[in-house]
Image: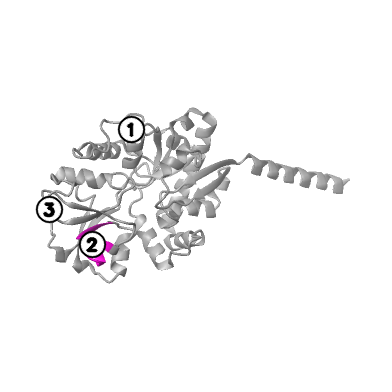
């Protein structure tokens, strides 16, 4: 009799476990770029079981130069995407209703890295210089900055020459550009690895120039927020994601190794990923509300920067409904 009862108990426990697995909500996250420590918090949350504990079966899709997160979202290939606010707002104004449900970075890591030998010591020296710029949505803060400075970007003698930069630092080394776009956590390290020292360089962080815009945030389609079950799943996703980023910040070396474990390309190195994680940690929110909270004042600053662009406007009117705290507030109760 005891044996039968034990067998029944084991069977019920197994069935309960199986039902729990089946009940996990499936979500897909599309990253903005390739697998690297810029996204360590998501991989850490997956590795540490935070998503599973939240009842989620999460798939992380790596990005790349030919992948536009918003297009993936629109096509149904993802439930949530990582994107920069300027790109998201431009996409929203064009008709795809992206909504920010959580802000991971509250500081910009973007900057122009210039050769001191190009005789550039301040933005006043940009005139006539060749500046490397990333496109595919990353050009918006730059164009707004040039507009603020009064520089044309059409190649005229009264402006700057815009070099459409690939996702590498080669133009600085082969003479194609006087300055290139870099991220504090990525390409700047590549410049130093290439043999240049800080003494050879002049840096112009967007934060210092007053043209910083919000970068890595989490976006969904507006329709997702009309479904209570989806909002619940997104709240659990955001809660687990916050835990993942907090863990990665406290364990940068371990987080970098998790990223390497998920890098199918084999192109990343341990030293670079550890350094990236350490720099990314400086961009995570330190405000009272913590990681994941989009500060309305920071949102408005980004909008102001974008609306200040006269020559090539990123957005033409102040957006409404582009972010919500509903998911964050629900996540904080979990």
Q: Nearer the viewer, mark 2 or mark 3?
A: 2
The answer to if 180 sits in the magenta stretch is yes
Of label 1 and label 3, which has the lower sequence position?
Answer: 1
Judging from the image, the colouring scheme is one colour
Q: Where is residue 199 drawn, in percent x and y?
A: 19, 68
Q: Which residue position is annotated with label 1? A: 93
The answer to if 121 sits in the magenta stretch is no
Q: Where is residue 193 drawn, in percent x and y?
A: 31, 69
**Local SS, label 2:** loop
Q: Is residue 122 visible?
A: yes
User: How many neighbours does mark 3 have within 10 angstroms: few (below 14), some (14-19), or many (20 or more)?
Assistant: some
Give the CA distance from mark 1 to mark 3. Answer: 31 Å
Q: Which residue position is annotated with label 3? A: 127
**Local SS, label 1:** helix
Q: Where is residue 280 drawn, in percent x and y?
A: 36, 55
Question: Of residues 91 and 289, which is closer to you in this image?
Answer: 91
Q: Which mark is residue 176?
A: 2
- Contact check, label 2 and label 1, Cβ < 8 Å: no
Give the CA distance from mark 2 to mark 1. Answer: 34 Å
Please report the residue visible at 48 percent of the width from the left and 32 percent of the height from the top.
Answer: 224
Of label 2 and label 1, which has the lower sequence position?
Answer: 1
Q: Where is residue 2 drawn, in percent x and y?
A: 86, 47
Side (left or right) of 115 relative to 328: left
Of label 2 and label 3, which has the lower sequence position?
Answer: 3
Start-end of magenta stretch: 171-181
**Local SS, label 3:** loop
Q: Is residue 211 visible?
A: no
- Contact check, label 2 and label 3, Cβ < 8 Å: no
Give the CA distance from mark 2 to mark 3. Answer: 16 Å
Question: Of residues 332 and 270, which is closer to you in this image?
Answer: 270
User: How many neighbours does mark 2 have within 10 angstroms: few (below 14), some (14-19), or many (20 or more)?
Assistant: some
């Amino acid at each position: 009799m005891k044996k039968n009862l034990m067998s029944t108990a084991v069977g019920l426990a197994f069935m309960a476990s199986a039902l729990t697995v089946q009940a996990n909500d499936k979500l897909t996250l599309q990253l903005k770029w390739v697998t690297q420590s810029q996204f360590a918090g998501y991989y850490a949350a997956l590795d540490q079981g935070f998503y599973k504990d939240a009842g989620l079966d999460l798939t992380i899709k790596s990005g790349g130069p030919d992948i536009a997160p918003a297009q993936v979202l629109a096509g149904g290939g993802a439930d949530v995407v990582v994107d920069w606010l300027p790109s998201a707002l431009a996409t929203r104004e064009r008709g795809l209703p992206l909504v920010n449900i959580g802000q991971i970075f509250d500081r910009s890591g973007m900057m122009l890295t210039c050769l001191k030998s190009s005789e550039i010591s301040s933005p006043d020296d940009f005139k006539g210089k060749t500046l490397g710029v990333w496109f595919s949505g990353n050009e918006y803060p730059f164009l707004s900055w040039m507009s603020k400075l009064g520089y044309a970007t059409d190649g005229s003698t009264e402006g700057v020459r815009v070099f459409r930069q690939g996702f590498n630092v080669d133009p600085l080394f082969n003479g194609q550009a006087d300055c290139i776009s870099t991220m504090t956590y990525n390409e700047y390290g590549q410049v130093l690895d290439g043999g240049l020292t800080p003494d050879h360089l002049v840096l112009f962080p967007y934060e210092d120039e007053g043209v910083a815009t919000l970068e890595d945030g989490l976006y969904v389609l507006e329709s997702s927020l009309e479904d209570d079950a989806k909002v619940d799943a997104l709240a659990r996703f955001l809660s687990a994601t916050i835990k993942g980023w907090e863990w990665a910040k406290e364990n940068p070396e371990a987080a970098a190794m998790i990223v390497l474990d998920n890098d199918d390309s084999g192109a990343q190195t341990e030293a670079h990923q550890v350094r990236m994680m350490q720099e990314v940690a400086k961009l995570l929110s330190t405000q009272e509300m913590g990681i994941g909270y989009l500060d309305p004042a920071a949102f408005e600053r980004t909008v102001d920067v974008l609306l200040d662009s006269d020559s090539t406007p990123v957005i033409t009117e102040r957006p409404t409904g582009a972010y919500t705290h509903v998911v964050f507030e629900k996540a904080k109760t979990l």
